[in-house]
Amino acid sequence: MESTPERKPVRVTILSRPYTLLATGDPREVEEVAAHVDELMLSIAARAPNADTTRIAVLACLHLADKLRMLERDLNRLKERVDRKSEEFAGILEELLTSEEG
């Protein structure tokens, strides 16, 4: 029977507001992600001083979603390239094995 990983509280601050998150794994990773989000939101707030926190959060989400989309596209291109190379190498290996048998 598989047990669920223990979730531990991790305190972070984003846009000057404290949050307690329940997280599994290394709390430092959660703190690093929260620090990145905080930095992004502070950067957006500095460029749009009249924006409320909801607008800042939405703009940060859009920025991160766009970044994720670009990384997924890059990853898919890389996977396609690896697949093509794998097929090429499999063909070369097949040719070598066939020529050794003959």
Image (spheres, helix red, strand yellow):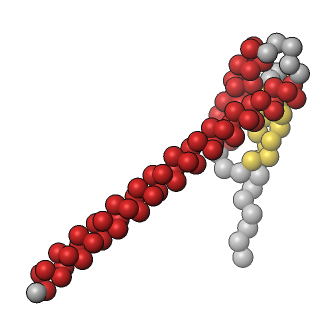
Near-viewer residue (75 or 11): 75
Location of residue 97 by image quarter: bottom left
Location of residue 48 by image quarter: top right
Near-viewer residue (73 or 35): 73
Near-viewer residue (58 or 21): 58
Residue 10, percent across and down? 76, 39
Residue 21, percent across and down? 80, 41
**In the drawing, does residue 14 fall left or right of residue 71?**
right
With respect to residue 16, does 26 lie above or below?
below
With respect to residue 58, does 27 lie above or below?
below
Residue 85, percent across and down? 34, 60
With respect to residue 25, does 34 lie above or below?
above
With respect to residue 30, does 100 lie above or below?
below
**Residue at figure coordinates x 40%, y 58% from the top left:** 82
Residue 19, percent across and down? 83, 34
Q: Is residue 33 visible?
A: yes
**Residue at figure coordinates x 58%, y 42% from the top left:** 70
**Residue at figure coordinates x 27%, y 72% from the top left:** 91
Quadrant where the image shows the C terminus: bottom left
**In the drawing, does residue 23 fall left or right of residue 87?**
right
Q: Is residue 28 visible?
A: no
Quadrant where the image shows the N terminus: bottom right
**In the drawing, does residue 7 fall left or right of residue 27?**
right
Residue farthest toward the bottom in the current orientation of the protein = 102
**Residue at figure coordinates x 13%, y 80% from the top left:** 99
Location of residue 64 by image quarter: top right
